[in-house]
Image (cartoon, helix red, strand yellow):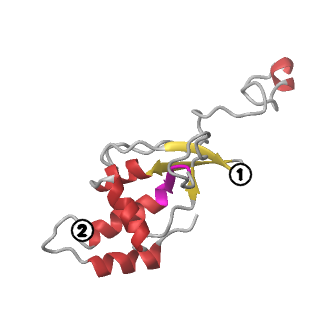
């Protein structure tokens, strides 16, 4: 360690300017390994001052080897809970007087729950798929974060 009194005087200061810490430095949540999730890309968003990793419905579907419409159908039928988070609603868009919402966002833990359930209950194999087990697993293990 350096005994320079000038460096000691600045020792308590952060190593970045301003009040907002850098996003790509050690200590911030890292983006996930794209190979683990079949190339699905994550987004890091700040929720109540804490950086969290999320996946849109399209990226969640990609990680499961499905289409986004399938994930939306599962949510509509109650097979998976509704997404806890959404992106802000787009401004100025109104389709046929429908309420326009933001994109669904799923956390890494929720995506892991979906992947585990689909692997455990062989959802990708129509001959062996156990949908009742899948739904029960999701109901019992869904992380509410």
What residue is at 21 percent from the left and 64 percent from the top?
A: 124
Residue 103 part of the magenta segment: yes
- Closest to the observer, 123 or 70: 70
Q: Label 2 near label 1: C-beta < 8 Å?
A: no
Residues 50 and 3: in front is 50
Q: Residue at x 39, y 49 (%)?
A: 58
Identify the disc placed on residue 123.
Answer: 2
What span is colored magenta in the figure? Answer: 101-109
Q: Is residue 27 above or below residue 98?
A: above
x, y percent for residue 40: 37, 45
Query: Hey, which quadrant is residue 114 in on the image?
Result: bottom left
Q: Nearer the viewer, residue 76 or 132?
A: 76
Q: Which residue is mark 1?
A: 48
Does dot 1 land on a helix, a strand or a loop? loop
In this rendering, position of residue 97 left or right of residue 10: left
User: In what element is the residue under mark 2?
Assistant: loop
Q: Name the residue: 57% across, 47% down.
A: 87
Q: Is residue 52 above or below residue 115?
A: above
């Amino acid at each position: 360690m350096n005994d320079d009194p000038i460096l000691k005087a600045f020792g308590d200061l952060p190593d970045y300017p301003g009040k907002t810490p850098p996003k790509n430095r050690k200590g911030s949540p890292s983006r996930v390994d794209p190979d683990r999730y079949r190339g699905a890309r994550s987004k890091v968003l700040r929720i109540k001052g804490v950086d969290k990793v999320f996946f849109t419905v399209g990226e969640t579907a990609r990680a499961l080897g499905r289409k986004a419409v399938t994930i939306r159908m599962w949510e509509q039928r109650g097979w998976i809970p509704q997404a806890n988070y959404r992106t802000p609603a787009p401004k100025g868009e109104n389709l046929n007087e429908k309420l326009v919402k933001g994109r669904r966002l799923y956390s890494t833990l929720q995506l892991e729950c979906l992947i585990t359930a689909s692997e455990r209950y062989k959802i990708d194999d129509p001959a062996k798929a156990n949908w009742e087990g899948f739904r029960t697993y999701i109901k019992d293990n869904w992380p509410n974060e």
